Amino acid sequence: MITRLLIGLNFVGFGFEFLKIGPNLFGGNITNQNLYDVGALDAPDVLQGHQYWRLVSCGFLHANLIHIAVNMFSLWILGRIVEQIGGSVRMAIVYAASLVLSSLACVYFQPDAFSLGASGAIFGLFGAFFAIGLKHGKPGMEMIKANLGILVLNLIFTFAVPGISKAAHVAGLISGFILMYAIYFLPRPMPAGVVDARTGAVLDAEFEPADRPPPA
């Protein structure tokens, strides 16, 4: 439910951009001024003590069609897993906190940054995913190992491609991990029907909580 809502809000944001910017949003000659006018994050403005709302608005805006397509695909895959295992409320808390904290990291570690996109919050879901895995003992560690390559590829992409906010991605990852680990109080069975992050298939087996004794 929360995953679908967030994807919907991102597309609403993209629709708002289209109304303001026009067809250039689909890969044309879009400018930073165009993106600034619709709510992109401009670090100098925030550091001067105003327009704090940009810390949030930037997370629902995207630079072009490819940008939103990649981010929404990642959100669909990760969001369903984190929401189904961790719960809708925890997932929403992690997403919101990671969005704001990744934006703040972008501002304070890259004080001339100009940024937009949901990737900081999505990296928060990466962190939450691995925190959940740790909470479920050996089965959870197997889940982490099976999907570690996805995180590594995203981190390589983060540091290898110019123009990506490294501070935002790393801050999102760390904050998502710490927050989910802190609020995921009691280990509980991994629910049947969990979506496999690698294939999108539905898993039949349940993961047992790490502290449950083996059957006699």
Image: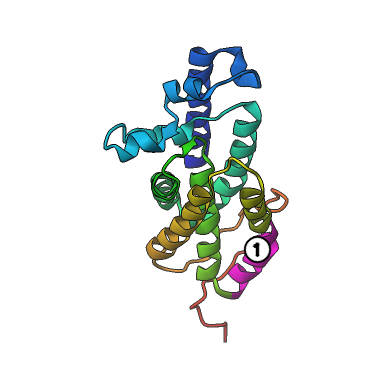
- Residue 75 lies in quadrant: top right
Horizontal arrangement in the rendering, residue 123 relative to residue 88 (left or right): right
Above or below, comparing residue 168 to residue 43 in the picture: below
Give how far across and how far down residue 202 sits, in percent.
Answer: 67, 52
| Residue 144 highlighted magenta (yes or no) | yes
Residue 62 location in percent, x, y?
A: 54, 30
Main SS class of the magenta portion in the image: helix
**Residue that appears at 58% across and 20% down:** 30
Q: Nearer the viewer, residue 82 or 125?
A: 125
Residue in the image at 49% along x and 51% along y: 167
Region in magenta? 138-149
Query: Which SS class for mark 1?
Result: loop
| Type of the residue with mark 1 | Ala
Q: Residue at x 57, y 28 (%)?
A: 63
Residue 9 location in percent, x, y? 47, 30
Q: Is residue 100 visible?
A: yes
| Residue 196 visible in the current orientation | no
Residue closest to the far left: 49
Mark 1, other Cα within 10 Å: few <14 / some 14–19 / many ≥20: few
Q: Position of residue 143 (x, y in %)?
A: 64, 64
**Outermost residue to the right:** 199
